[in-house]
Structure formats: structure tokens, C-alpha cells
Amino acid sequence: MNDPGDTFCQERVAFNGRIVADATHEIQNHFAVIKEYSGLMNDLIRAPVQDVSDGFSRCLDITGKINDRASRAAKMVDVLNRFAHRGDRPTGRFSINEVVEDLALLLQRAAAQRRILLNVSHGRKNIEAENDASIFQYLLFSLTQPLIDMMEENGAIIYTISRGRQKAPMIEIDASGIFLSKVSIADLMRPELLKVCLDRLGGSIAEDQTPGKRFRLMLTISSTA
Amino acid sequence: MTNTIEILLVDDETEFTETLAERLRLRSFNVTVASRADEALYSMDSGLRPDVILLDIKMPGLDGLDALAEFKARDSAIEAILLTGHGAAASSIEGMKRGAFDYLMKPIDIGELIAKIEQAAAKRRERQELGTAESDK
């Protein structure tokens, strides 16, 4: 049997690989669209002139779309960069809001493939913690990714960030829709790995569900490691 | 040159399909687009008979590889060119084993794509002519 520590390391390496693979795929999709837009502009410029004003208007429209795609690709690169750097230090002060929002963006592709809406809901207040951001993002991913796979199309997963007891950061993962099978925390993540994460984060987790329709997780982590 | 090649372009990235379709139409190809494999299969069930299918591998619902078998079941002479992201070489090779004509990595070079479309359409014509000749014997 594998040592839980080894399994934990292997799972985290696999997690990093999965995130990088999905993010780079998404970035490449943006480049593919940008290339088609620039090719189309080239085609239109070379095509026999019918109405110059129409041509200008079309090109302006296309440059706007290229700009939008380039911005989205750049944002994904930023998020991926922050994701990679969260492992630089074992603990440090970080924004819970930022980690959750970044992870939601990194999981958008997986969610979109199954037509699942993935959103973050939080107040205007930024909630911070002095903890291990790298483990925190790994735990959130490990709880969310299987949920996406266990839901039928057109479901929704909403992260809500708030403060729980003693002002500890609390993240609710609220999945609603139709589930392909019964869900429990143990179906999402191996208990020994969950325990390692919660121990390192000084955290706890609780679940609540309406069978087949809604499944909620309430994850609390310590404000200070 | 007038092209009468009928293309069915299937990809869930709608900005990509709409733009690529326009570029192919500017080159006189007939292009129908679908954002999902089941939508493309419905078009075929409604009478569309494309010469070549341009098929994204990773899509919501039925993925490109499973869809390929469904397209072939409806028209065994149909040729498919798979469109893939990087790192999906294994899926592309699997697609070739399942009868795809070829595959291209995104971002696509339009010249290379057109060359492959024309080769695929020529192969389809050969197969159709061979099929007609066999049935005439």
C-alpha cells in the first residue's frame, strides 16, 4: 500500500498537471480564434472592394474581438502564473477571494465541457488568511472537479466566501442540478488525503444535501496557520 | 476555380467556427457549422451530405472521436479531419485508427487546411466512384 504522504505528493503533482493542461488548452483556443480573425481581416483587405465603409466597419469589429480574446488570454496567463507561485512558500498571507476566483477561472473549461455554470459569490470585503494557499487551492480543486463530473448538464456550482466562527474564512461550495449518482464527501476525495489537507489548513468541512438535487460543502480554514 | 466541396464544421468554440467558416466561404466552399456533435448528426439525419467534416475532438456532450463513428455509420464514404489542441496527439492518433482522414493542430494554417480538405474530398470521390462501379458490375 502506498504511504499517504507519497499519495498526497502524487495527487498534487497530478493536480498541477491537470490545471496547466486545461489552462494552456484554453490559452491556445484564444490564439486559434485570434489567428482566424487576423486571417479573416487579411482576406477582407485582399478581397475585391465593394463598399469601403463596410470594410472599415467590419475590420473595426474584428479588431475589437481580437482585443477581447488577447485580454482573455493574458488574464488566463496571469491566473496561471499566480497559481504556480502559490507554492513558493509553505505559508503566507493570501486573499481567499483571489484564490477562489482564480480556481473558478481555471476550472471554467472543465465546467463548460459539461455545461455547468461555475461562479463565485462574495461581498465587497476581501477575506484574507495566513495559511498554505497551495494546499487550499488543491483542496478546493479536489472537491470541485469530481462534483463537475458527477453532475448532469445545466447544473450550477457556486462558491460563496464569508467568515464563520471566530471570523475563520468559510467557503461554501453549493452544487445544484441533477446528480448522476449519490454524492458524499468520500466520493469526492479520499478521506486520508482530505485529512492531510484539513490538518495542514487547520480546517474542517461539513456537508448538507437534498438527495439528487443539491449538495453543499462548508469548508472552514484557520485564519492563521 | 469554383469549389463545390460541402464541409460540415463542428466545434464548440463558436467564434472559431464562424470565422473559419467565413474564410472557407470566401474561398467558395459550402460550409455548414454546428457547435455540438449531436447538432451535426441531426443535420445529417435531416439530409445534409457533407463531403468533409472538420471535427473538434474535445466538445461538450458527444466528443469528436465518438461522433466520428456516428458520422461514418450515416455515410461510410465521409471523410473527417480532426481539429485538436496541442497535447492531444494521442487522441488524434486514436481518431486516425477509427477512420479519420487526417488531423490538424490548432491554431490552423488555412493553406494547409484547404490542401487537406481537397485531398479528403478527392478520396471521398474515389470511394464513391469505386462504390458505383462495384454496384454496376
Image (cartoon, coloured by chain):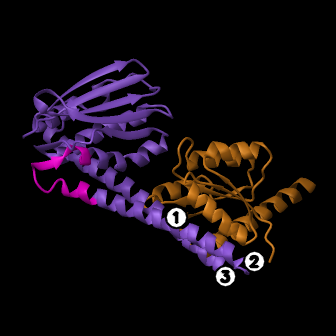
Chain colours: A purple, B orange
From the top left corner, tell me how far across and down residue A1 is, in percent. 18, 35
Q: Residue at (59%, 72%) from the top-left corner?
A: A59
Q: What residue type is labelled 3?
A: Arg
* One can see residue A202 in this view: yes
Q: In this view, does B16 lie to the left or right of A165?
A: right
Reply above or below: A25 against B43. Answer: below
From the top left corner, tell me how far across and down residue A17 is, in percent. 30, 53
Q: Residue at (62%, 46%) from the top-left corner?
A: B37
Mark 2 lies on residue: A50
Q: In this view, does B72 lie to the left or right of B13?
A: right
| Spatial separation of the CA atoms under disc 3 and disc 2 | 11 Å
Q: Which one is closest to the eye, mark 1 or mark 3?
A: 1
Which contiguous range is marked in magenta? A81-99
- In reply to whether residue A90 is colored magenta, the answer given is yes
From the top left corner, tell me how far across and down residue B47 is, in percent. 80, 46
* One can see residue B107 in this view: no
Element under disc 3: helix
Mark 1 lies on residue: A65
